[in-house]
């Protein structure tokens, strides 16, 4: 009976943390949907509008290592409760912004709160589930990425149509306060509890820094950064690419891309969790094989989607590319927790969060945009006939997004190289 009760408690905890993760991504992406009326109301240009997204990311990845270190030393429940309260109140507080400096500061605070939750919750889940059940649990937790993002776009789009961008932040921010209080009902597991470990000593800073000397961990994080680089750039430039290159109305392009992201992301995570478990039962490197294969297959599919002539074919290619990019999401975290000792899991996730965003989606949208503008200016300076007819910079953007499959090649090579490194490097 005790085992059955413990199992029910573990799944209840997973459900609650997954719901909070869904709110996390909902709060994160509602800004993109209401950016146009927000810019109009606060008199912000495109540069300032772009920096509002970067403000969140700065607060997010700069504080992640700090929260990871705390999560391995102190009770995670209270830290996570504080993080959820901070990001929820700051999201609601975004509705009160009257200027760009105020907006920038508030969005940074949202990032700080979300960093606290995101760095600790996967380690909590890993302490409740072991073996292939851990991969299943983490896959369910990360389903919130495409689903929460799609809901954020949908809710934000509704308020954007009426011009009431402030209302969107009230509606998506305040529910998080109630969900945060529900964390009080959870029992926090010991570090390594699911693996049968006794009470573990808190890690020293030296042990945390030694993670940066583990080859297998660094290769995993490097491939993860390549995946994040591409997904981040796709999220920003996907609708614009469909609009400029294939003539889709902007509203239709945004809707189509949002549907693709939600449907294919959800399907990919479900398939990735199942396939990862099947492969892991047959081979110790099953998760890594899935990660490397999905990234390698994404390269030609992504190239096809970005170069094909027809809009319908481009949509199909983008759907397949997004499916392959999201396929290994659950196995990535599961493999990470197999690489590092149990008392370093929150720190490992925190350092990973820092590096995948620093080298991933923090700069990838801006880099694609810079390439696009550079190509367009070069064509115009050369007196190209195509440039004169390219009023919306469709040609330049085509060149910019072609950076993405090149980065995916690097990611596939890094994850493939993990197969040559001992599986239990920490043992």
Image: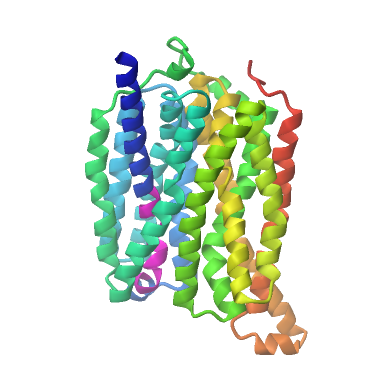
The front one of 163 and 103 is 163
Membership of 54 in magenta stretch: no
Can you see residue 231?
yes
Q: How is the image coloured?
A: rainbow
What x and y, as percent, mark residue 352? Answer: 56, 37
Name which residue lies at 54% across and 38% down.
Answer: 274
Q: Main secondary structure of the magenta part?
A: helix
What x and y, as percent, mark residue 195? Answer: 49, 17
What x and y, as percent, mark residue 22? Answer: 37, 47
Instruction: Name the quarter where the N terminus is drawn.
Output: top left
- Range of magenta residues: 24-38
Q: Quadrant of residue 120?
A: top left
Can you see residue 79?
no
Name which residue lies at 67% across and 72% down.
Answer: 398
Q: On the rendered structure, is 20 left or right of 391?
A: left
Name which residue lies at 31% across and 69% down.
Answer: 158
The front one of 293 and 275 is 275
In the rendered view, would you say 89 is above or below 239?
above
Name which residue lies at 56% across and 66% down.
Answer: 237
The front one of 304 and 188 is 304
């Amino acid at each position: 009976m005790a085992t059955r009760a413990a199992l029910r408690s573990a799944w209840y905890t997973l459900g609650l943390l997954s719901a909070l993760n869904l709110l996390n991504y909902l709060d994160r992406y509602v800004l993109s949907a209401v950016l146009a009326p927000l810019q109009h109301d606060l008199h912000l240009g495109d540069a300032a509008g772009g920096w509002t997204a970067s403000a969140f990311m700065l607060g997010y990845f700069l504080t992640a290592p700090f929260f990871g270190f705390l999560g391995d030393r102190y009770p995670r429940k209270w830290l996570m409760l504080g993080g959820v309260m901070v990001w929820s109140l700051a999201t609601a507080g975004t509705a009160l912004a009257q200027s760009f400096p105020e907006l920038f500061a508030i969005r940074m605070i949202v990032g700080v709160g979300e960093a606290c939750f995101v760095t600790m919750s996967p380690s909590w889940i890993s302490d409740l589930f072991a073996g292939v059940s851990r991969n299943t649990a983490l896959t369910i937790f990360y389903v919130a990425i495409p689903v929460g993002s799609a809901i954020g776009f949908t809710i934000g789009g509704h308020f954007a149509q009426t011009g009431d961008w402030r209302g969107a932040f009230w509606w998506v921010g305040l529910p998080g306060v109630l969900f945060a209080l529900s964390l009080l009902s959870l029992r926090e597991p010991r570090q390594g509890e699911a693996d049968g470990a006794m009470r573990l000593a808190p890690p020293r800073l030296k042990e945390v820094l030694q993670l940066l000397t583990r080859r297998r961990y660094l290769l995993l994080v490097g491939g993860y950064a390549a995946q994040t680089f591409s997904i981040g750039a796709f999220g920003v430039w996907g609708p614009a690419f469909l609009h400029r290159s294939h003539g889709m109305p902007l509203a239709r392009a945004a809707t189509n891309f949002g549907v693709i992201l939600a449907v294919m992301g959800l399907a990919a995570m479900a398939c990735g969790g199942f396939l990862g478990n099947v492969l892991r039962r047959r081979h110790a490197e099953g998760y890594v094989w899935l990660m490397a294969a999905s990234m390698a297959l994404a390269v030609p599919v992504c190239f096809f989607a970005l170069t094909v002539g027809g809009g319908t074919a481009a949509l199909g290619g983008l759907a397949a590319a997004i499916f392959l990019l999201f396929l290994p999401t659950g196995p990535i975290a599961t493999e990470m927790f197999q690489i590092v000792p149990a008392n370093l899991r929150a720190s490992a996730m925190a350092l990973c969060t820092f590096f995948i965003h620093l080298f991933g989606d923090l700069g990838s949208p801006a880099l694609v945009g810079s390439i696009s503008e550079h190509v367009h200016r070069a064509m115009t300076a050369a007196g190209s006939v195509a440039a004169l007819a390219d009023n919306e910079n469709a040609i330049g953007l085509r060149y910019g997004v072609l950076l993405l499959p090149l980065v995916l090649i690097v990611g596939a090579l890094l994850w493939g190289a993990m197969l040559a490194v001992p599986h239990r490097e920490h043992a």
